Amino acid sequence: MTEVVNAVAQTSAVFPGGMLRYEVAMPDPASHLFEITLHCQEAAPTLDLKLPVWTPGSYLVREYAKHLQDFAATDEHDQPLSWRKVSKNRWQVQTTNSDQVIIRYRMFAHELTVRTNHLDASHGYFNPGAMFFYVPDREDQAIALTIHPP
C-alpha cells in the first residue's frame, strides 16, 4: 500500500500548476473523517463547486453532500474568502480575483459500499464521485491527487 501512495504523491508533483490539486488526509481514522484540501488556480471573481449526486454504475440520486463538514475557503495567503451554499450540492466562492483558492472540508466516511466512502482504523476507501468537488466546465481537465496516510 505504501508504494501506491508514494507513487501517487510523486506523480502529483509533475502536473502543471493550473489544474485542480486534491489532497486527502486521514489523521484520525477512528473518527471516520477524511480531510480534503482542494487547490484551484482561479482568475474569475466567482468559483463554482459541485459535488456529484450520482456514481457511474449506480444510477440513483445520492446525497453525498450530507457527509460534508467544516467547509472553508481561503486565498493563497490564508485569508478567508466569502462563500455560500447555493443548493444541496453546489457552493460558490467569491475569489476576490485571487490567484489561488484553497478549499478545505471533511467528509464523514462510515458506509462501506463501492459507491460511498469508508474510513476506520483498519482501512480507508473513497470513491472520488462521493468525495471530490468538481468545477463545472472543467470536468475534462486533469487533476492531481496526493494522499497523506495516517
Image: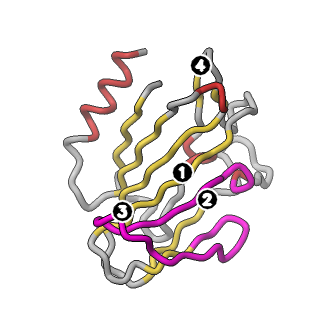
Q: Amino acid at mark 3?
A: Cys
Query: Quick check: 147 above or below 35?
Result: above
Contact? badges 2 and 4 (CB < 8 Å): no
Residue 56 appears in which quarter of the rendering?
top right
Marks 1/4: CA distance? Answer: 19 Å
In this rendering, would 6 be left or right of 118?
left
- What residue is disc 4 on? 123
Contact? badges 4 and 3 (CB < 8 Å): no
Marks 2/1: CA distance? Answer: 6 Å
Circle 2: element type: loop
Q: Which circle's residue, 3 or 2, is located before the other in the chain?
A: 3
Q: Which label sits on residue 132? A: 1
Q: Which circle's residue, 1 or 3, is located before the other in the chain?
A: 3
Q: Residue at x 55, y 43 (%)?
A: 128
Circle 1: element type: loop
- What residue is disc 3 on? 40
Residue 12 appears in which quarter of the rendering?
top left
Residue 50 appears in which quarter of the rendering?
bottom right
Q: Residue at x 39, y 61 (%)?
A: 102
Viewer-nearest of discs 1 and 4: 4
Viewer-nearest of discs 2 and 4: 4
Q: Residue at x 47, y 36 (%)?
A: 25
Quarter that holds the N terminus: top left
